[in-house]
Image (tube, coloured by chain):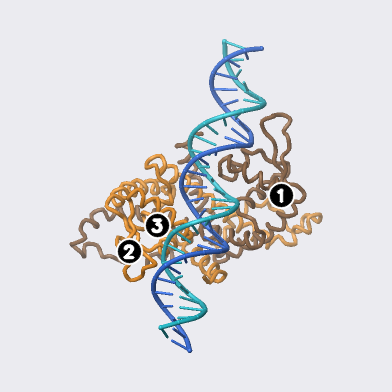
Chain colours: A brown, B orange, C cyan, D blue
DNA sequence: GCAGAATGCTTTAGGCTTAATCTATTCAGG
DNA sequence: CCTGAATAGATTAAGCCTAAAGCATTCTGC
């Protein structure tokens, strides 16, 4: 039971060389197979993420009339009670600074976050949760965790660990590649 | 070696019952651990997808002055030379119909796709690649595959298969959950 | 036939996102 | 000091995306 070939069924078993008319396709079959493998993996990764993301967005919307970016920003602040600067938020959320400006504007208007002057640097300021923000976020976070647990409950504890490990490796490699290209 | 507790290092090993002051935290530690596990897995999945997506978007932009949704739409059409109806595109791309309308409008303006009347149903039509669209897409697809292969090259062939299998299971479970909630 | 439901697509309003550009402030060398 | 570079945020224009509403056409059951 070392390798039950878990996805063997995916290729329609086109016995090699069985169709002369398709010789051109067969010619590059080795490298093509490798490339298709990567492509399929990427598409599946994307699909999974989108499915979960859509699920969560819908829930946030119907339960709390809010959005994922807003929730994400609040959750970053919740992990940093002293507050975060705009560029720190931008880096952690993996979005551009202009984007953060808009979201903070909204949340500040709703009194869920506040901008605090940074005495040491008059260009910058700290964004921090208000009391109301903490209360509202705690409520949302509780349900949010339940949604995630539920959506991932199709995998066993062990599979969770395996997936986490594989994604760690993938993430590390992505960071290396993209850092090389965009040294920033 | 049946369960090497792969994520054991992540919690600061609070020996059970060793700290009376933390009794409340320890009480729910089992379920809390499960929840954090799921949350961390989800965040990592999201990060990986975003890293790759951003990489690809940047490349498409700098190399072909195009965007991922446009590329995605062309690639769907490339797999269906006879053309696809709008709602089929919408389903395959996992976006709403109104969105597809806008992207097809653009691509049609650039003469990369064309709308063909559907004699059997005058409400609908087929969207199909033009010759120019085929040519342009072939060029892009070639490079795109190379980017994906490169970005996934940090994992071995075997790890690719494992990841693909785990994601298949996850995807299946997501589909079941979201279908139940939104029968559509 | 025909009324009502369903379907295919578009439009609209609003939020997210980016890249590019701008202003204000800080920093680094001379 | 003072000038130029770098940094922190905000702004802008343009594109993606959604949900909801609207229009035209087709289907269904009577």
Question: Judging from the image, what secondary structure is the residue with disc 3 in?
Answer: helix
Residue highlighted by disc 1: A110
Between marks 3 and 2, how big is the CA–CA gap?
A: 32 Å
User: Do labels 3 and 1 touch, CB within 8 Å?
Assistant: no
Residue A147 lies, in percent from the top left, at 62, 63
Of residues A138 and A5, the one nearer the viewer is: A138
Labels 2 and 1 share a subunit: no
User: Do labels 2 and 1 touch, CB within 8 Å?
Assistant: no
Of residues A94 and A63, the one nearer the viewer is: A63
Foreground: disc 2 or disc 1:
2
Residue A87 lies, in percent from the top left, at 61, 38
Of residues B95 and B150, the one nearer the viewer is: B95
Residue highlighted by disc 2: B117
Between marks 3 and 1, how big is the CA–CA gap?
A: 43 Å
Question: Judging from the image, what secondary structure is the residue with disc 1 in?
Answer: loop
In the picture, the disc for residue A40 is 3
Residue under the point 20% across and 58% down = A23
- Left or right of B25? Residue B150 is left
Between marks 2 and 1, how big is the CA–CA gap?
A: 49 Å
Of residues B37 and D6, the one nearer the viewer is: D6
Residue under the point 71% across and 60% down = B29
| Dot 1: chain letter | A
Identify the image quadrant of residue B180: bottom right
Residue B135 lies, in percent from the top left, at 28, 49
């Amino acid at each position: 039971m070392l390798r039950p070939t878990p996805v063997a069924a995916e290729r329609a078993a086109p016995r090699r060389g069985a169709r002369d008319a398709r010789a051109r396709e067969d010619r590059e079959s080795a490298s093509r197979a490798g490339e298709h493998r990567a492509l399929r993996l990427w598409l599946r990764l994307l699909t999974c993420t989108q499915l979960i993301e859509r699920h969560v967005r819908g829930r946030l919307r119907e339960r709390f009339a809010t959005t994922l970016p807003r929730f994400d920003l609040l959750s970053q602040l919740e992990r940093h009670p002293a507050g975060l600067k705009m560029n720190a938020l931008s880096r952690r959320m993996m979005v551009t600074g202009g984007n953060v400006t808009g979201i903070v504007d909204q949340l500040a208007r709703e009194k869920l976050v506040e901008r605090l002057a940074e005495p040491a640097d008059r260009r910058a300021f700290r964004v921090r949760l208000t009391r109301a923000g903490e209360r509202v976020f705690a409520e949302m976070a509780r349900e949010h965790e339940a949604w995630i647990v539920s959506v991932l409950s199709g995998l066993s504890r062990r599979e969770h660990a395996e997936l986490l490990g594989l994604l760690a490796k993938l993430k590390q490699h992505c960071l290396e590649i993209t850092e090389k290209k965009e040294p920033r």
